[in-house]
Image (cartoon, rainbow, N blue to C red):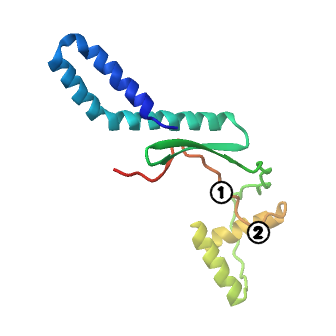
Amino acid sequence: MDLTPYLDTLRRDLAATAAPGGPEITRAADLLAGSLEPAARLCLLDALSDAADEITTQLSGADVEVRLRGRQAEFVVTETPPATAPAPQPPPVDSTGDVSRITLRLPDALKDAVERTAATEGVSVNAWLVRAVTGAVHGGQTGPPPPPTRRSGRRITGFAQA
């Protein structure tokens, strides 16, 4: 989508408004229009991005993005796979009850893998093991819950050239 016709219309409207004021006012309006063009272009891109976000919320199964190529803005529609039902979550662990201590013997390779996985998830090995055991006891889920999917409010991707 070429934004230039919209910016040209803005420039013409500003010149028409300034014309009754004489040549000095017309010249000032022309200089002002030239200075405002980058800001107006950015404002139009913001409006297009907001429109794409709103359209995305109304569609099921597609994301709409605005991409900038040179001075051209284009809408890109990407189909998203249908959402799968979330995995059942294990019941929360009662942290107010009594705590028991056990000794667990693991092969070194498995212990290292547990430590890496717990560190990756940002939890202690003990918390990771409690969650894994709770999941195994209540429904077979052994891993952590899947991370929530997020949709950014405004996203502009592409290449800008000054």
Q: Quadrant of residue 112?
A: bottom right
Looking at the image, residue 3 sits to the left or right of residue 56; the answer is left
Can you give x and y, in whole percent of width and height, for residue 85 in the image? 80, 50
Are the residues at dot 2 and dot 1 in contact (C-beta closer than 8 Å)? no
Q: Foreground residue, 3 or 63?
A: 3
Q: Residues within 10 Å of mark 2 (few under 14, many from 20)?
A: some
Q: Amino acid at mark 1?
A: Pro
Instruction: Give the mark toward the camera: 2 or 1.
Output: 1
Question: Residue extending furthest left?
Answer: 24
Q: Amino acid at mark 2?
A: Val
Residue shown at 37%/52% (left/top)?
161
Q: Secondary structure at mark 1?
A: loop
Note whether 112 is above or below 30 in the view shown. below
Q: Earlier in the sequence, mark 2 or mark 1?
A: 2
Note whether 80 is above or below 55 in the view shown. below
Q: Residues within 10 Å of mark 1 (few under 14, many from 20)?
A: few
Can you give x and y, in whole percent of width and height, for residue 45 in the image? 46, 38
Can you give x and y, in whole percent of width and height, for residue 131 in the image? 71, 65
Distance CA(mark 2)–CA(mark 1): 19 Å
Q: Foreground residue, 151 or 4?
A: 4
Residue shown at 19%/12% (left/top)?
21
Residue with the mark numbered 2: 133
Residue with the mark numbered 1: 147
Label drawn at residue 15: none
